[in-house]
Amino acid sequence: MNPTTFETDALAVLRRLVGDERATFHDGQFEAIAALVQDRRRALVVQRTGWGKSAVYFVATALLRAAGAGPTVIVSPLLALMRDQIAAATRAGVRAVTINTANPTEWGEVYAALEADQVDLLLVSPERLNNPTFRDRQLPQLAARCGLLVVDEAHCISDWGHDFRPDYRRIRDLLANLDPGVPVLATTATANARVVADVVEQLGVGGRDVLTVRGTLARASLRLGVLALPYEESRVAWLVAHLADFTGSGIIYTLTVAQAEDLAALLLRNGHEVAAYTGRTEPAEREELEARLRHNQVKALVATSALGMGFDKPDLGFVVHLGAPSSPVAYYQQVGRAGRAVESADVLLLPTPADRDVWHYFATASMPEERTAQAVLDALAEAGGPLSTGALETVVDLRRTRLELLLKVLDVDGAVTRVSGGWQTTGRPWAYDAERYARVAEARRREQRLMLDYEATDGCRMAFLQRTLDDPEPQPCGRCDRCTGVWYPVGVAETAVAAAREQLVRVGVDVSPRSLWPAGMARLDVPVSGRIAETEAAAPGRVLARFTDLGLGQRLRALLTGPDVPVPDWVLPYCFEVLREWPWEQRPVAVAAVPSLSRPQLVGSLAAELARRGRLFDLGSLALAPTAPAEEAAGNSAYRLRQVFDRFSVSAAQREWLAAASGPVLLVDDLVDSRWTITVAARVLRAAGAPSVLPFALAAVG
């Protein structure tokens, strides 16, 4: 195939893809396609969102398949991305299918189509690469027949990337097992020089040369701005007042699920057509919501980062953030959803004081500690067979999500492997790379500081983002609030703020009682198992709000993370409102306090005031066992239970009163997290004679 014919054929595929007979390649697109198809090279494409990275692999797939190559395999991170890519591939005449957690009933048909060579392009999630059945049965066949391997959102490969995922590191092993003649393409819109170097190193495993195609990351259509408002209610009031001012439809990003759900509900109550989209949203509902946004049937989706990489709506009119992502790179990736096929799109950031707490949590989530990693390896070695994640929770003090991340890290390091029935050790030596993790942690702290610098900069905001991404050509955009002045309203009417405050102060969140003890507690010398006996269990409880709630949740967060003080006057009316609306079967007759090592004044005074004003008997605080450990933060459920299991007891006087109690006891604490403190305290009170125990606290975590 001579160059002229090759380019003609490539251009024909491109025009089918975009549905435009006059379409031409963007700078760098044909260069990348030629490298893959003609030279069978490995290439990294770093280009801004909307440049057309997917066109490179769709056109390359069509040309390679026409030349007799096997199917293209795309490792893609999100279901939204997969759905959009399949639709685009169909337009280009490419037969595309996917294997992911949302379509297990279709896997048999997909495997049969692959076997019959009726698939041009297969999309898989990185998590599939370590599914035991897929890894052992399907992946070797795909590696042997693959005509092109594509790693989409390739910054996820890198420790230094803003969205690093341990599962992506398995791609290096896949690359090492590919036939040398199979071309490889990696794409991303969000990679600075450090990430580019790291990805190139991994693509070049085996000494392969890697072509890097990089263009400017400036987005001429975006008008950037930052609006700092003092209070949660003022930020929400601003959105209520001005959401309709934005052109078209868009996305409002929040940092937590609770914020997304609360904000969506409030905007709906105020007449805005919005919906929440989070990691809790079911796959079928996600697809419906994406379609509604794509067809402008909603003004906005109020979303977490679950709606991110790959969502394709070229005419998205705006992106607003209530709370800042943890780095300018992550921010650029999210705002890149807007303005891809329109001349102007608005991007506004409303930072919040709680942003740094959220950043800290996620920055450390995938960073293993040597002590806990070694404990997992020792337990697996001693077990002599697979252990489930649940069984490992009684061995290592980590929450389930962090334990799963640790296991993935150990897996890609070759120390453990996932098998039917759980995890087992490989027996290979493993050394904790403290220096590497320290470097990554410092890089993430530096990114957080850069995000604060972005908020405060007096220079062009787009140029700031370009410099952060090591763009070789940063230039003032002439559009942002620093280049041309503020383009958005900055004030909020006090009446609007008051209305938002009234709606945000939604008190009363249910606390479901624990019903089961964690499995394997005997390993931790805690003699409980199975279902919690009805005679020992707490009744359903209440808290005023969750830490992550907009409005009252943020005020309670400030109270409970500050110094220990007697209960403030402003808290009590909310408490009485919750108590008045509590649909208990019988009104409590007494109040008992959970003894607190960190906030004894707050908890003790709260319990006393509730007893005094409610005319209930004041039992005082439960006693702390003499050997009660300090309230250091335990990690997972099993270890939290062990930490508090023998902590509480009742005095002789309390026992005497409880033996004759005629109604429930209100059990008061400051904060509910794992629910094991209130479960164990309720068990002690029930054993002493309390007919029922109603847990009540100021706030809940999450």
Image: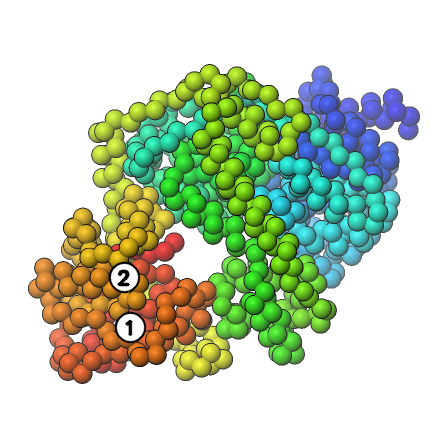
Q: Is residue 307 visible?
A: no
Whole-percent x, y for residue 321 in the image? 44, 35
Q: In the structure shown, which secondary structural element does the residue marked by tag 1 occupy?
A: helix
In the figure, residue 412 lies in which quadrant? bottom right
Q: Quadrant of the C terminus?
A: bottom left
Q: Which one is earlier in the sequence, the residue at label 2 or at label 1?
A: 2
* Residue highlighted by disc 1: 681
Q: Quadrant of the N terminus?
A: top right
Whole-percent x, y for residue 180 in the image? 86, 47
Q: Residue at x 52, y 70 (%)?
A: 396
Q: Residue at x 87, y 44 (%)?
A: 181
Measure how far apart labels 2 and 1 are at the Cα level: 17 Å
In the figure, residue 120 lies in which quadrant? top right
Q: Nearer the viewer, residue 405 or 648?
A: 648
Whole-percent x, y for residue 18 in the image? 67, 25
Q: In the structure shown, which secondary structural element does the residue marked by tag 2 occupy?
A: loop
* Residue highlighted by disc 2: 599
In the figure, residue 309 lies in which quadrant? top right
In the rendered structure, the answer to whether residue 626 lies left or right of residue 255 reads: left
